[in-house]
Amino acid sequence: MLRRVNFWKEESEAPLLRLNHSFLPSEEILQKIEDNDEIDFVTNFNHERIIRLDAERTFLGVNQRTTLMDVLSFLQNEFKSYHQAMSYVAGFLLLTHSPIKVIDIMRQLHRKILVGYWTEEPIAFATDAYVFDYLLADFYPDIHQHLSKSFILPETYAQKWFTTLCVNVLPFKALFLFFEIFRTQSLLTSSNTFLFQFALSLMKHIREGILQTKNIAVIYQHLRLDSSLPQFNTKFDELTVSIVEEAKDYDLTSYDFVKLREKAFNEKLRSRLEAAKRAHDEKKNDQTSCITSSSSDDDDDTDDETLASHMEQLRIE
């Protein structure tokens, strides 16, 4: 996309480029662009409303929005699921890759690295959020205790790091480095361990700010690297680059992530999911008892409503 004639005229103020900070157009990045086969991608999808909205939240120009919607609809059709985080990641990748290449990268992430993250019920992400909570307790028990006392749960802040891969969190200078390391390391190992390393590094760099306040809103500002905070106003790009570069310093080879995920699910999520299922079953039974033989035409609607309610109860965002 960066090579499109009117790209900067249309997208200089785009939501996706909010954290560009004049990093683009970078000559180094422009030399790596792989979008020569962009015109070969053609789709025929009727885009769902949520995909249209997500495209509008990403780009300003019609051409860029259309390309993103085509990619997202293609992926939704293939994955049989959709999550808003997909628009963040795909939108960023489209800056320097062709739609076909972006689909290939997203496919690899979905199948091998972020398995279960981009679904309507991202239980896999919630599980990994609590895996990180265990790691945080080991590496930085003071931060872990402070967040726990403030009732700040890991799935409420880790989503922007894990599911969206830090798009709209890191400024572009750090974000391009993050993606380079993440893709290289993760595709080689077929794991998302780098995300945990990055999260620990981030916590180290914001530790002082978090421990100095009990204001929950301010804590969340630190966790999402809100550049409006005074300590992030200066040298923000350098700070975030350091966070990414120092992620490699965390050796997690001694951790059994399979067992940690089992522990996280059993201790933190299983009871919540079972409670949601019971509530769903109870509501369904109550509604069934009210059905009369003359209301058969309404059966499908009732089932749809209870299923939607169940999905909402299970949804972990």
Image (tube, rainbow, N blue to C red):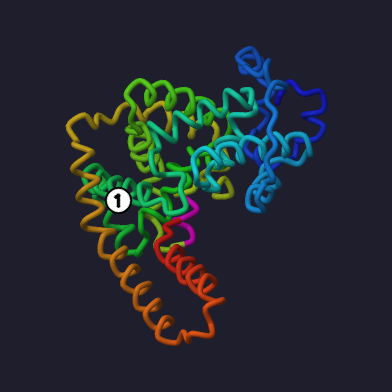
The residue at 37%/60% (across/down) is 152
| Residue 250, image x, y percentages | 28, 31
Question: Residue 229: within the magenta?
Answer: no
What residue type is disc 1 on?
Answer: Tyr
Position of 135 with respect to 282 (left or right) is left
Asked if residue 248 is positioned above or below residue 205 in the image, the reply reads: above
Q: Residue furthest top?
A: 31
Q: Residue furthest front?
A: 293
Label 1 sits on a secondary structure element that is helix
Report the magenta residues as a range.
217-222
Q: Quadrant of residue 138?
A: top left
The residue at 41%/81% (across/down) is 288
Which quadrant of the figure contains the C terminus?
bottom left
Q: Which residue is mark 1?
A: 130
| Residue 171, image x, y percentages | 57, 35
The local crowd at label 1, few if under 14, some if 14 to 19, many if 20 or more residues have their Cα within 10 Å, is many
- Of 143 and 102, nearer the camera is 102
Q: Quadrant of residue 233?
A: top right
| Residue 165, image x, y percentages | 48, 38
- Of 129 and 174, nearer the camera is 129
- Of 198 and 276, nearer the camera is 276
Question: Residue 220: within the magenta?
Answer: yes
